[in-house]
Amino acid sequence: MDCREKVVNALLLHLDDDDSDVRESAAEALGKLGKNNPDILPLIVQWIEQHQDSDYIGCGIDALWDMVATD
């Protein structure tokens, strides 16, 4: 596993952190990383599918939105 994969996996783990600031920061970082790396998109989609019943699913959706939104 390379450094980028480790970072992405760590950020995915933080999408359901108890601290809302941590969740928001992880979603924002994933969205920004995903703009430059299309391999992140399926990982976020997979996280959303696996966490459909989570109270924090919105963070996965936020990350997805940050990937496709234009500044």
Image (cartoon, rainbow, N blue to C red):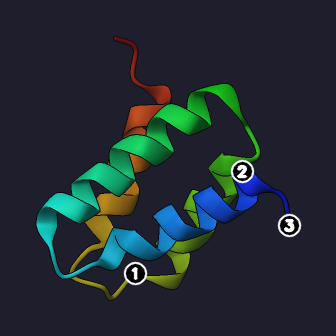
Q: Which of marks 3 and 1 is nearer the N terminus?
A: 3
How much space separates mark 2 and mark 3, taking CA atoms? 8 Å
Query: Residue at point 62% right, 70% down?
Result: 46
Tell me the crowding category of disc 3: few under 14, some 14 to 19, or many 20 or more residues within 10 angstroms, Cα based: few
Q: x and y percent of residue 31 in the render?
A: 46, 39
Amino acid at pointer 1: Gln
Residue denoted by label 2: 4
Q: In the rendered view, does 27 fall on the left or right side of 19?
A: right
How much space separates mark 2 and mark 1, taking CA atoms? 26 Å
Q: In the rendered view, does 9 fall on the left or right side of 48?
A: right
Query: Residue at point 39% right, 23% down?
Result: 69
Q: x and y percent of residue 35 in the render?
A: 58, 28
The quarter holding residue 66 reads top left
Amino acid at pointer 2: Arg
Tell me the crowding category of disc 1: few under 14, some 14 to 19, or many 20 or more residues within 10 angstroms, Cα based: few
Q: Which residue lies furthest to the front in this view?
A: 3
Q: Residue 1 carries which label?
A: 3
Q: Residue furthest top?
A: 71
Q: Which residue lies furthest to the left in this view?
A: 20
Q: Depth-wise, is mark 3 or mark 1 nearer the camera?
A: 3
Q: In which quarter of the image is the N terminus?
A: bottom right
Q: x and y percent of residue 27 in the render?
A: 36, 52
Q: In this view, does 31 lie above or below 57?
A: above
Amino acid at pointer 3: Met
Tell me the crowding category of disc 2: few under 14, some 14 to 19, or many 20 or more residues within 10 angstroms, Cα based: few
Q: x and y percent of residue 57 in the render?
A: 32, 71
Residue denoted by label 1: 52
Q: Depth-wise, is mark 2 or mark 1 nearer the camera?
A: 2
Query: Residue at point 30% right, 85% down?
Result: 54
